[in-house]
């Protein structure tokens, strides 16, 4: 059975991993929440995840850093962000195997972009990517493109450590260096409804491909896949 482009019939496939990335306040939270509700309305088992997950032991340390309560060495905090993703790896794989589509707000691309944007000796983009190599790779990356100047006009901007326009401009530059064949850029300066329509199309295509058995790839590892974890015995 097909409902507006999303095949909800039983199929030996898996859930999709759809990721939102972009500078702070570009609309990731709004669009990811709306997308989950849309997919659920289409009969897709969908769930919203956010990184960092601030409710784990490591996540609480990260939250303290981001809100300015504590200071941590830049390399050390980068590794904390990566560890926060690794501690969720098995739960992510289990959800995808069970057919659940994960809509994820930030992931390893953000981790690499934000640390590399500091332009510190020894913490270049390749170093920043290394700790996350081997994690599950997203099936689609929805990059919400918005200038830092426009994002700064949105409510709540400046409440956290990295929400400074100069920093955000450099983060945006690093994101462009990270873009790969999974990325689809969406102009986030348009209306919420226009952005949502494009986001839905990208996500529905990813869901359909994964239902058909598209292999789950490994992050930053060429053509390696994790498909053996999804194959029937």
Image (cartoon, rainbow, N blue to C red):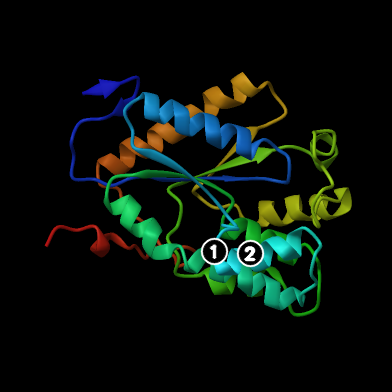
Q: Is residue 226 left or right of residue 72?
A: left
Is residue 215 visible in this depiction of the protein? no
x, y percentage for residue 209?
Answer: 32, 40
How far separated are the C-alphas under marks 2 and 1? Answer: 6 Å
Q: How many marks?
A: 2
Residue 206: image x %, image y %?
39, 39
Secondary structure category for the residue under label 2: helix
Q: Which residue is drawn at 31% across and 43% down?
A: 210
- Find residue 44 and name its label: none
Picture residue at 62% right of the left edge, 38% below the top: 29
Circle 2 packing at 10 Å, graded few (<14), some (14-19), many (20+), is some
Compared to residue 229, the image places residue 121 above or below, namely below
User: Is 173 on the left or on the right of 232, as rendered?
Assistant: right
Determine the residue located farthest toward the left in the rendered image.
233
User: As drawn, is 129 to the left or to the right of 224?
Assistant: right
Relative vertical location of residue 90 with respect to residue 5 in this rendering, above or below: below
Give residue 56's mark.
Answer: 1
CB within 8 Å, label 2 to label 1: yes
Residue 79: x %, y % from top left? 62, 74
Which of the image's four quarters has the C terminus?
bottom left
- Seen at 45% across and 65% down, the residue is 135
Q: Please tell me in which quadrant of the rendered image residue 71 appears.
A: bottom right
Determine which residue is flagged by label 2.
60
Give the vertical position of 186 relative to 171 (above or below).
Answer: above
Q: Where is residue 224 in the image (x, y as percent from the top left)?
A: 37, 65
Question: Judging from the image, what secondary structure is the residue with disc 1 in?
Answer: loop
């Amino acid at each position: 059975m097909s409902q507006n482009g999303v095949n909800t019939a039983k199929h030996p496939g898996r859930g999709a991993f759809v990721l939102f990335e972009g500078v702070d306040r570009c609309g990731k939270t709004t669009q990811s929440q709306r997308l989950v509700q849309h997919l659920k309305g289409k009969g897709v088992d969908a769930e919203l995840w956010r990184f960092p997950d601030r409710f784990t032991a490591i996540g609480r340390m990260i939250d303290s850093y981001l809100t300015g309560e504590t200071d941590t060495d830049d390399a050390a905090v980068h590794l904390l962000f990566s560890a926060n993703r690794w501690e969720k790896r098995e739960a992510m794989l289990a959800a995808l195997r069970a057919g659940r589509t994960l809509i994820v707000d930030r992931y390893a691309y953000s981790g690499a972009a934000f640390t590399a944007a500091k332009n510190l000796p020894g913490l270049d983009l390749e170093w920043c990517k290394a700790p996350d190599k081997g994690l599950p790779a997203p099936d689609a990356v929805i990059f919400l493109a918005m200038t830092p100047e426009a994002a700064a006009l949105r409510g709540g901007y400046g409440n956290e450590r990295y929400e400074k326009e100069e920093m955000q401009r450099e983060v945006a530059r690093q994101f462009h260096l990270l873009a790969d064949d999974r990325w689809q850029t969406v102009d986030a300066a348009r209306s919420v409804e226009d952005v949502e329509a494009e986001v839905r199309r990208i996500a529905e295509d990813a869901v359909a491909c994964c239902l058909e058995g598209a292999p789950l790839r490994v992050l930053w590892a060429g053509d390696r896949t994790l498909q053996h974890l999804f194959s029937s015995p």
